[in-house]
Image (cartoon, helix red, strand yellow):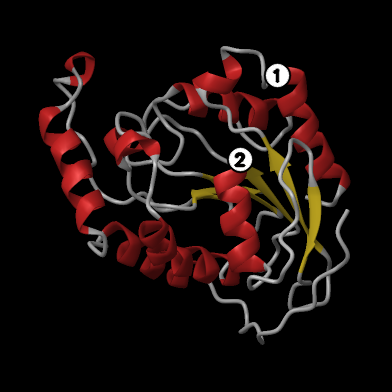
Amino acid sequence: MASPVPSNRPRGPARGTGDLARLEAEITGCRRCPRLVAWREQVAEERRASFRDEEYWGRPIPGFGDPAGRLLVLGLAPAAHGGNRTGRVFTGDRSGDWLYAALFRAGYANQPTSRHRDDGLQLSGCWVCAAVRCAPPANKPTPDERDACAPYLEREVDLLPDIAVVVALGRFAWDVAWSVLARGVRPRPAFTHLAEAALPADIAGRPRTLVGSFHPSQQNTFTGRLTEPMFDAVFARARALGA
């Protein structure tokens, strides 16, 4: 595990859910990245045949979960016909099926499925968000799009003062989490499944840890690169670290 990283920026006082609501409104109204705006709206207009009777969200996707949670799960970006359709992160796609089933088994979710944003799913002790808030073409944000979204993550974490563990789903999320939350300290620790790195302590001086996991994409789950026991081990480790 990497050595603790000192914080090099004062953190403001914890704020309430009203501040999170204001941040959510700002995120969902964002139009900073023309390529992403065009793509998410095109997908929402054209729709996949199997969802042709549904109204797509077609906007950026805010975070979701328990504002008092000690676990933050960070993904890459919404799926074009998942979060971009349903309006909730990791909802309505195969990656979300894996994630919320694992969170349910670990005791962070009240149900193992996530079909749409009004399906009754509730998270306890956990907050889920994405490094990039709009669905990108080919699921590949550009560096400029990544950097345009990074301030949202920084502000979100400032509004979630009890976060003790950040689980990064995939290398992209790992790199963004380190860049934003460790303030770009070098060298950046290497990503692998169950990798760990110390993040700056929170405002009360409590330790925070970044934990890596392979992303629950079909590319990983269909090939066996990520199995349910491997995924469960990530959240068991998060619990052991205080989340």
**Mark 2 surroundings within 10 Å by alpha-carbon count, few (fewer than 14), some (14 through 19), many (20 or more):** many
Against 206, residue 126 (above or below) is above
Residue at label 1? 228
Tell me where residue 123 appears, x and y as whole percent: 59, 41
Type of amino acid at the residue the image marks with label 2: Leu
| Mark 2 / mark 1, whichever is N-terminal | 2
Residue for point 14% across, 21% down: 53
Task: Give whichever of 147, 200 is nearer the camera.
Answer: 147
Task: Give whichever of 201, 218 is nearer the camera.
Answer: 218
Tag 1 secondary structure = helix
Type of amino acid at the residue the image marks with label 1: Glu
Tell me where residue 166 appears, x and y as whole percent: 69, 52
Tell me where residue 138 appears, x and y as whole percent: 34, 34
Against 37, residue 188 (above or below) is below
Which residue sits furthest left?
45
Confirm whether residue 62 shows in the render.
yes
Which label is found at residue 169? 2
**Mark 1 surroundings within 10 Å by alpha-carbon count, few (fewer than 14), some (14 through 19), many (20 or more):** some
Task: Give whichever of 18, 138 is nearer the camera.
Answer: 138
Confirm whether residue 124 shows in the render.
no
Q: CA distance from mark 2 to mark 1?
A: 14 Å
Residue for point 46% across, 70% down: 151
Which residue sits furthest front?
187
Left or right? Give the position of 227 relative to 222: right
Against 231, residue 201 (above or below) is below
Tell me where residue 179 appears, x and y as whole percent: 60, 65
The reply to whether discs 2 and 1 touch (Cβ–Cβ < 8 Å) is no
